[in-house]
Image (cartoon, rainbow, N blue to C red):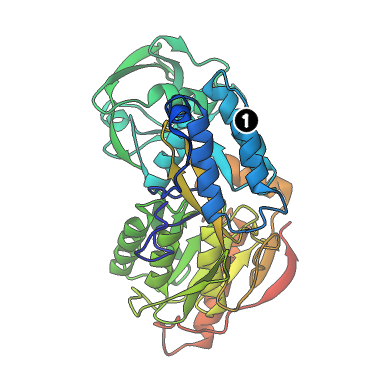
Amino acid sequence: MNHLIQRSFLSQLLLSTTLLTSAVLAPCFLNRPAQASFQDSPKVLIDEAWQIVNHEYVDPTFNRKDWQAIRQDLLSRDYSSKEQAYNALRLALKQLDDPYTRFMDPKQFDVLNSQTSGELSGVGIRLELDSQTKTLTVVEPLPNSPAAKGGLKSGDKVLAVNGKSTKGMTVDDASSLIRGQEGTKVVLRIGRSGASEFDVPLTRARIELQTVRYDVKQEGKRRIGYIRLSEFSSHAAEQMRQAIQSLLAEKVDSFVLDLRGNPGGLLQASIEISRMWMDQGSIVKTVDRKGGSEEIAANRTALTKLPLAVLVDKNSASSSEILTGALKDNKRATVVGSQTFGKALVQSVHPLSDGSGLAVTIAHYYTPNGTDISHKGIEPNVVLDLSTDQQRKLYTNPKLLGTLEDPQYIRAIAALEQIANSHPTNQNVGQRLTPVTTTGLSAQ
């Protein structure tokens, strides 16, 4: 991700979540006596990060701050620990007033790498904190994972990890204990309704996270291919391709692509997925700190031209907005739901020498129509906001998403029905349709 270099400028970047890449740093020139002590101090990490920002940050004025003076100040201090250096670096980056340009300690950077790689070393369970009992609960074991093979079930309570009670732990706290090096052992203490507590020994394995889930929905006479994409990880495009091809084999006549709650991810994944739905047209344009622009377009590799509706909400961000903007501006899909988040920035992510990492905003992006969505988001063709109660109902019970208990999904089906009725002799439509447009609705 963080490959800011050569291949395609876009192809190695990541949006909203991360990019992995090797950093090209400007050398730090010091006199020889100072060099040895400098290399052994936290200052080398600070200067490493400073150099990356200096070379790549999208705003050459650095938010009208004297970036050279900030470097001098950082390197003039004495740091008794890496933690002190980390805090100083975070405060320096805060002066850019850009929440997406950020420093991550090794633990945070490892989490980010797992998210964007779409893989982790663990046992393969999705956890949530039960809102009533405040206990960590298994949402589901992932297929073919150690957890599934070990007999864990949805609804199981994870009471302890290697003998350490999970009482009072967050999902992240427990996850960090459960994850570990591939091939190592972990023991989960499990509580299950109707049974005594018991231990489940598991061997950690490399887990490919499922970011795409799909199903055939029979809605009246229509066969809907419903696809939910939770994040644009490195495996998202191949999983999306498999989903589309599988649903086409099931003879669906239209699609609903659910991007609600999707915070973004890898830029390249959003481009590849856009090309699965679009045969032609622009996908996105990026502009860097020097004003240089690059436009990425479809390349006649679409997998389907069937009618498409896209579901979005206020948490659909970054790569989600690139995909949504491309499909909307090219009239390839009807967008249904709430205004999206409004993140139009691209970051590159760099590993630093001590295992920590740095995300740096390096470009601004625009939708095919040239729209800057920063802080505004994308307005759906069909605006349908959910009430607070409806949101709570859906997101505390995700199984209701994409069902007749989901008002935005119902409205997407109605939009697809309207498109089908306007093309009664050709169900294999989808390129440059006139989307259904309705605004100002509120689900009650």
Circle count: 1
434 and 70: which one is in front? 70
102 and 332: which one is in front? 102
Which residue is the site of mark 1?
76
* As drawn, 319 above or below 200: below
* As drawn, 256 above or below 196: below
- The amino acid beneath tag 1 is Ser
Give the left or right position of residue 272, taking residue 386 as reference. left
Q: Residue furthest left?
A: 183
Mark 1 burial class by Cα count in 10 Å: few <14, some 14-19, many 20+: few
What residue appears at the point 30 percent right and 32 percent down from the top-left corner? 148
Secondary structure under tag 1 reads helix
Let me know if residue 88 appears in the view.
Answer: yes
Coordinates of residue 159 in the picture (x, y in percent)? 46, 16
Coordinates of residue 432 in the picture (x, y in percent)? 50, 84
Q: Residue furthest bottom?
A: 425
Give the left or right position of residue 376, taking residue 201 as reference. right
237 and 130: which one is in front? 237
What residue appears at the point 54 percent right and 15 percent down from the top-left corner? 167
366 and 144: which one is in front? 366
Coordinates of residue 157 in the picture (x, y in percent)? 46, 22
* As drawn, 113 above or below 419: above
* As drawn, 437 above or below 257: below
- Find residue 343 and report its image quarter: bottom right
Q: Quadrant of the C terminus?
A: bottom right
What residue appears at the point 67 percent right and 43 percent down from the top-left corner? 69
Let me know if residue 401 appears in the view.
Answer: no
What residue appears at the point 34 percent right and 52 percent down from the top-left corner? 235
Coordinates of residue 242 in the picture (x, y in percent)? 30, 60
